[in-house]
Each structure stands twice: as C-alpha cells, then as structure tokens.
Amino acid sequence: MPLPPARIVDTRTGLGGSSEMLGEFVPRTYTVTGVGGVPSSGVSAVVLSVTSANSSLDSGLVVWPTGETRPSVTSLSITAGRWSTNTVITKIGPGGQVDVMNRWGETHVMFDVQGFFTDNTVTTAGGTFVPLNHDRIYDTRNGTGGSTTPLQGGVARDVQVIGVGGVPTTNVSAVAVNITVTNPSADTGLLAWPTGTTRPTVTTLSTNAGRTMSASAQVKVGIGGKISVFASNGSLDLFVDVQGYYLDNTQIGRDIFVPITPQRINSQGAMGVGGIRGVKAAGGTNTVTGAVVVRASGVTAVVVSVTATDPQGTGFFTVWPAGATRPPMSTLSYTASDNNVTNTVIVKPGSDGRINIYSSGGAPGTYVDVQGYYQKQAPPPPPTPAVSSSTQPRDAWTPTASNVSLTFSSSSTAVTRYVYATDDETMASAQSVTTTSGASKTVTITPGDGWHTVYVRSIDFANNLSPSRPTRSAPGRASPSPRRTAAPPGSPTSLVSLHRITDR
C-alpha cells in the first residue's frame, strides 16, 4: 500500500529514538509500524528509503527483521564521505521492528517510509503489483516525457506516469519507478511525491555534486496521473524508468508479496565491457547454503538488491528479464572512486527464471540479494449464496403446487454464476444460471414426490466456489412429519431441502 513519503528515523535529530551515529557492528532496533502512516497491525513488510550520511569509512548497512539472524548481505553500500540511498523492502519482526547495523566506521542513518505490504490477515482487494518490462518515461537530456530543460533546485516539476511505458490509464494507485539523477551541479536531494498533494520534507535519493545516483521508489499516483519531483539544490538531469504499477482497490483479488530475510543468490567477480551475466532468480539458491530462496513457479516478479562491487572504472548496469530485449537504460551507475554501489530492482523473471545484468564497462563484480518476491494468489472464494423462495418459506410446510421457485443472490460483486442440482451432492448434473456482480437470479425446479435436496453454489470470475449454508423448506398438500436434512460436514454448498408429500 503506497504512502506519502514520511521520515521515521533520523539519527541526526534523534527521530526514532537515538541521536547517536551508528558505530561498527552494533545493531540498533527501530519500530516501523504505527508510524509514518504504517498501520500497527496486519503488516508483513515495509518499503523504506534508507540513507547514509557523513560516513567515516567505506561501509555497508544491513537491515533485517528483528528477532531473526543477521544476514551476511548488505542492504546499502556506502562510500566514505558521500550520501548513499537505497530502497529496501524489509520483512518486519515481532513488535513491528527491524534492526540495522553498520559494518565499518560510523554513519548517520535515515529511514523514510514509502509504503507497506499487508499480511494474510488482511483481505482488502487491490494492491496487486503488475511488473513491466522496464521503460524510460522521462529524460531531460532528450525530451522524453516532455522537457529538455534540466531540473532546477527549488522548482517542482510534474511527470506523467500513467498511460505511458505500459502503465494503463485507469485503476492504478501507484507506480514503481527507478529515478536517476545525473550531472548534478551541487550536493542535492531529490523528492518524489503524488502530484496535487503537499510536498514532503524527506528525500527519495541524495547525491553529491557531479555524481550520478539511482534509487527505486514506489510513489502514489496523483492528480492527472502524475508524480511530482523536486531538487533541493543546483541543477540536474533526471531520468524516470517505470518498473511496474499497483492496481487500486476497485480490482478484485491481489497478488501477495512474500518478504524474506535478505539472501544472496549471486556473487561473482569482474565483468568485461558489454558483458551480460545471467542470474537464476525464480528457483534461485543461496550462494552459501544452496537452499532455494525463491520458489521456481508462480512468481511474477522478484525484488533484488543489485550491487556493483569494486568497480575499476566508470560504467552502469542494466537489469532485465532473460530472453527479453535489453532496454536502453541504466539500473545503477558507478565510478572507480566508488566502493560498492547498490540499487533495488523489481524485475520479472525471464527465461528459465533468470534475470540478466549488463555492464557497460569498468570491470565491476556483482552481488544479487533477494528481499522478497511477488506470487500469484487467487482471490478468496465468494461468500455463501443466499437462497430464498416465494413459494417455500424456510423451515415451514406450505401447501403448494409441484413447481418450486428459488432465488439465489450474493453479496459479492465477483460472482458471475450460480450452479444448482437436485439430489446430487456431487453436482455432476448441475444446472447453471449466469449473473452480473452477484445480482439475484430466480429459477424454477419441479421435484418429484418425496424428500428432495437442492445443492447451490456461487462461482466467481476466477472459478472459485462458495462455502455452504443449509436451507430447508417443505412443500406438499399434506403436512409432513418433522424431518431435518443437515449439510454434510465441510459441504461447500447451500442446501435447500424440499419435502413434498402427496395424498395416497
């Protein structure tokens, strides 16, 4: 669920509980639920923009769920004396908390929350993430998106994000974008937020003069299908690459995000100029233990931190699904003066579950660490259909003709069909009546003399079947002796028991 960006931790001011810099190998715990717009319950993971400032040494930050073993992977790579930012989607631990640790020296840390993911106790529709082949939708260097003018410090600019790059024009709540700043004339921070809302005071990414920097962001869509961007200082060129979008709550059902404690699935040495490295993502395994990290099937996208390690020159990485055409854009940039450079990417698994990494040069090595993945999840089954009758009241004998009128209805707008069968619990011979958005439908049946049971189910657009509710009535020209027909345990149907007795 996307949120307006909000700062929840800042060691420079004491926000979140401490005004001390993070030292070496001393974990610190922060609460990330119940703050910044994140609910206090029903949350499985949070989306954080993690920033390091004033680092004394080249280092790395590790972020992980409180209560779990600290992973050996890095969430954010740090070059001494420079601002570094990365988006981290982290699973939360008990009490809605996460831990953070700095490897070397000391550094200030900031957490800005961008959104959260609900756990399986929440059944709210919407929020499904739709991954796209990455596409550049804004570039001030060539006019893509409408402007060839560099972004000036102190002046907001709107960027169209729906109806472009594969994002539809309706039913979109937020976009996942990779934002890149290049040629900054001064140390600066870039902000991104929904157009038409108040500009936040927190940055999406921070960088130094002359340094190209990228960061992923999940931004709510604002007025006109746009997001707004703002640089705090200087002037800069700006790229925006769309990675996917989130459906709004008018959409039924949702994919589920599966957060994990970060695990490394790739660790390799220097790449050649123009080299392409394939990494097994869906079905990928831990580089140390060999254990499977991401399931091999049903995965729509993976969230990975990709790191360029120990670059010897200037260059960039591009990450995309194996088997697809490499998009003409960068995922992260690096120089020889960088220690390591990390950026988070949401990418579809391609051929054989793999993703590709392209290096333009500079001989960097690679780390790929999984933060989580999206998997298909069918919507929950529709509720039990209501069954009523204009001829046969529930639990009562009514002298009637042999025809029985039954009306089916559902409170679920996902229901597209009712199926029913007389005296056939297997429903092998079921009849069907179509409906729209669970609207009422009336059918007529003609049971023979004696006891009869009608089994009824509602079916939604995904062919999910409803659970059960027994319904009884008794037609006939003579009052029948009491008899109850109960629904079999676990029966997935509504039952209508028709008790018809004739004179002999």
Image (cartoon, grey):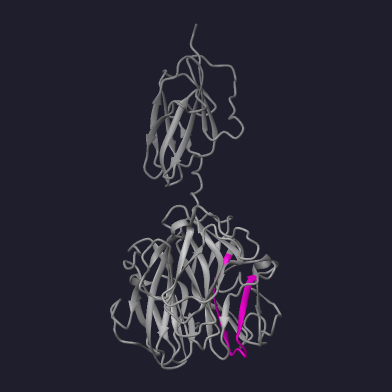
Q: Position of residue 187 (x, y in %)?
A: 47, 92
**Residue sitting at the far front:** 272
Q: Quadrant of residue 190?
A: bottom left
Can see residue 96? yes
Number of numbered tags placed on the structure image: 0
Q: Nearer the viewer, residue 417 or 85?
A: 85
Q: Residue at x 28, y 80 (%)?
A: 143
454 shown above or below 319: above
Q: Position of residue 229 (x, y in %)?
A: 40, 81
Q: Position of residue 354 (x, y in %)?
A: 48, 61
353 shown above or below 497: below
Q: Nearer the viewer, residue 37 or 440?
A: 37
- The prevailing secondary structure element of the residues shown in magenta is strand
Confirm whether the magenta stretch covers residue 496: no
- Chain part drawn in magenta: 45-64
Q: Residue at x 37, y 87 (%)?
A: 155
Can see residue 114? no
Q: Quadrant of residue 192?
A: bottom left
Q: Quadrant of residue 174?
A: bottom left
Confirm whether the magenta stretch covers residue 62: yes
Q: Residue at x 48, y 82 (%)?
A: 205
Q: Nearer the viewer, residue 433 or 428?
A: 428
Q: Position of residue 373 (x, y in %)?
A: 53, 61
